Amino acid sequence: MIEVRDLHMHFGGFRAVDGASLTIREGSITGLIGPNGAGKTSLFNCIAGVLTPTSGHVLFGGEDITGLKPHELFHKGILRTFQIAHEFSTMTVRENLMMVPANQTGETLWNAWFKRKTIAAEEAALRQKADEVLEFLTISHIADEKAGNISGGQKKLLELGRTMMVDAKIVFLDEVGAGVNRTLLYTIADAIKRLNVERGYTFCMIEHDMEFIKMLCDPVIVMAEGKVMATGSAEGIMQNEQVIEAYLGTGIKNKEATEGLTKDAIPAPAKKTAKKKPPPKSRR
Ligand SMILES: Nc1ncnc2c1ncn2[C@@H]1O[C@H](COP(=O)(O)OP(=O)(O)OP(=O)(O)O)[C@@H](O)[C@H]1O
Ligand SMILES: [Mg+2]
């Protein structure tokens, strides 16, 4: 469904994405993992039209979509959520959802005066759709809350809900599970699975939580230093020596490192600059 060919995103002399190539199969929930600063969000931003790549191509069903703007991609059914949730904080949760669909009649002064009935009917339909989405996500009880007052996890669900207000084909999720409590994480995971199975959504999701990845993703793509370094099943990836090295800066012989991985957690380096540091001596 998506093919990324030799993509580069350079910021000045810095190569955030440095020749990444990957494919996302239609109907899959593809995971994208990698240490902090690996270039995952930059890659998403290039695919989703937020950034224009320095070079390389993005294809959608064989069509070259490189450099198209987010609204153009939106109309093709390519949507993304943000690492930091983007809600309209003074509007209610329901109103936030009702903001999403494009091509509403009510936007010009002319329509506001002369097509009141059409507008009222559209608004009623939108409201119903928003309520269905809230029910699907099991958050109907917060429909009338101001979006600024809901929890971080509920904001993530709202982000997911926005993608359901239109007929998305592929949704890019940037750390939708980050900072979310366990119960809400399962609700999010369940919603993603159901959208995938029942509505045919394809997903590509950036995530650091390996348990979450294992629950949902096949395949998993690993990025490090702007490149794709491995692709495979979650289990396979977690046994991959190169992958462990990229995360921990140590070899697989390091007992502590491999034990850490079997506990479902690939620890992300604490600092953005970690990838440039030599491996800590204490781990050897
Ligand atoms: N607009 C920008 N200008 C300059 N450098 C940038 C810009 N955006 C990202 N970078 C740098 O590019 C590198 C990759 O960043 P990116 O956000 O894509 O990483 P990431 O894999 O999403 O990391 P994380 O897991 O921490 O979210 C980082 O070193 C970052 O500081
Ligand atoms: Mg990121």
Image (cartoon, grey):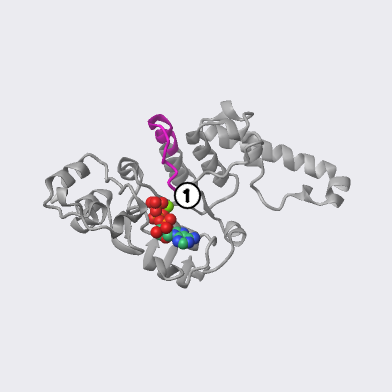
In magenta, the rendered stretch is 172-188
Magenta stretch contains residue 186: yes
The answer to whether mark 1 is within 8 Å of ligand 2 is no
The answer to whether residue 28 is seen in the rendering is no
Image location (x, y in percent) of residue 111? 84, 49
Q: Secondary structure at mark 1?
A: loop
Q: Horizontally, is 121 left or right of 157 in the view?
A: right
Q: Which residue is mark 1?
A: 200
The residue under the point 40% across, 34% down is: 186
Q: Horizontally, is 203 left or right of 123 in the view?
A: left
Magenta stretch contains residue 94: no
The residue under the point 52% across, 63% down is: 51
Q: State the residue lying farthest toward the top.
A: 141
Tell me if mark 1 has few (under 14), some (14-19) or many (20+) residues whose alpha carbon lies within 10 angstroms of its own: some
* Mark 1: amino acid: Gly
Residue 267 occupies quadrant: top left
Image location (x, y in percent) of residue 122? 74, 43
The residue under the point 85% across, 50% down is: 109
Q: Nearer the viewer, residue 13 or 58?
A: 13
Image location (x, y in percent) of residue 1? 45, 62
The residue under the point 22% across, 53% down is: 244
Q: Classify 242 as above or below 165.
A: below
Q: State the residue lying farthest toward the bottom.
A: 55
Image location (x, y in percent) of residue 200? 47, 49
The answer to whether residue 7 is seen in the rendering is yes
What is the number of callouts on the image?
Answer: 1
Q: Classify 18 as above or below 197.
A: below
Q: Horizontally, is 90 left or right of 233 in the view?
A: right
Q: Classify 196 as above or below 138.
A: below
